[in-house]
Amino acid sequence: ENYYKNIWGIDISDEALKLASQKGIKTKKANLEETLPFEDNTFDCIIASEVVEHIYDTEHFLDEIKRILKPNGLLIITTPNVASFGRRLMLFLGKNPFLEYKLSGGAGHIRYFTFRDMSNFLKEKGYILIKQESDTVNIFPTGKFSQTWLAKIFPTLGRCIITVVKKPEI
């Protein structure tokens, strides 16, 4: 049985929405900085992958996600780890670890998180932490010599923060 019949993708980009639609995903155009276009308690699970670092009002964003999650619903949120091994190495060498300092160029990140920042922030917003992990540890900032096994042993040195939380039953 297919339990995943109600999959939605939201984006502000028409091109991204078109690509998602072509893959059979229902879409809505929305600005993540505003009220999300869904009723309260709509979703069992929400995946916010590599978006929170682009959000100005992260508190409103997490409140909106909690509003549209069902009680005990899961949020899987991923974001780059500002304290990854590769970034630490770059700082040690006196180089900018891919932190934007101007509006043009770069990835458009305006928020940066460590593992502790992300878990504390989500707890402050009323979520229950289930787990945190990372995908890989980059030995060099360019991604050369990435090691997934190191991320299992030393997740806080990993490239990406992957956090799973749930909305309380209340």
Image (cartoon, rainbow, N blue to C red):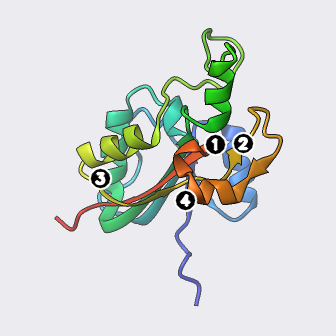
| Front residue of this view, candidates 149 and 38 | 149
Q: Which quadrant of the figure has residue 168?
A: bottom left
Q: Residue 137's x, y, as percent? A: 67, 47
Q: Which quadrant of the figure has residue 89?
A: top right
Q: 155 above or below 83?
A: below
Residue 138: image tag:
2
Are dots 2 and 1 in contact, CB under 8 Å? yes
| Most distant residue in the left direction | 170
Of badges 3 and 2, the one in the foreground is 2
What is the crowding at mark 2: few (fewer than 14 residues within 10 Å), some, or many (at least 20)? many
Residue shown at 34% from the left, 56% from the top: 68
Disc 4 target residue: 8
| Front residue of this view, candidates 31 and 105 | 105
What is the crowding at mark 4: few (fewer than 14 residues within 10 Å), some, or many (at least 20)? some
Q: Residue 66's x, y, as percent? A: 31, 52
| Most distant residue in the bottom direction | 1
Quarter of the picture holding the C terminus: bottom left
Q: For the residue marked with disc 4, what is the amino acid?
A: Trp
Q: CA distance from mark 4 to mark 2?
A: 32 Å
Disc 1 target residue: 159
Tag 3 secondary structure: helix
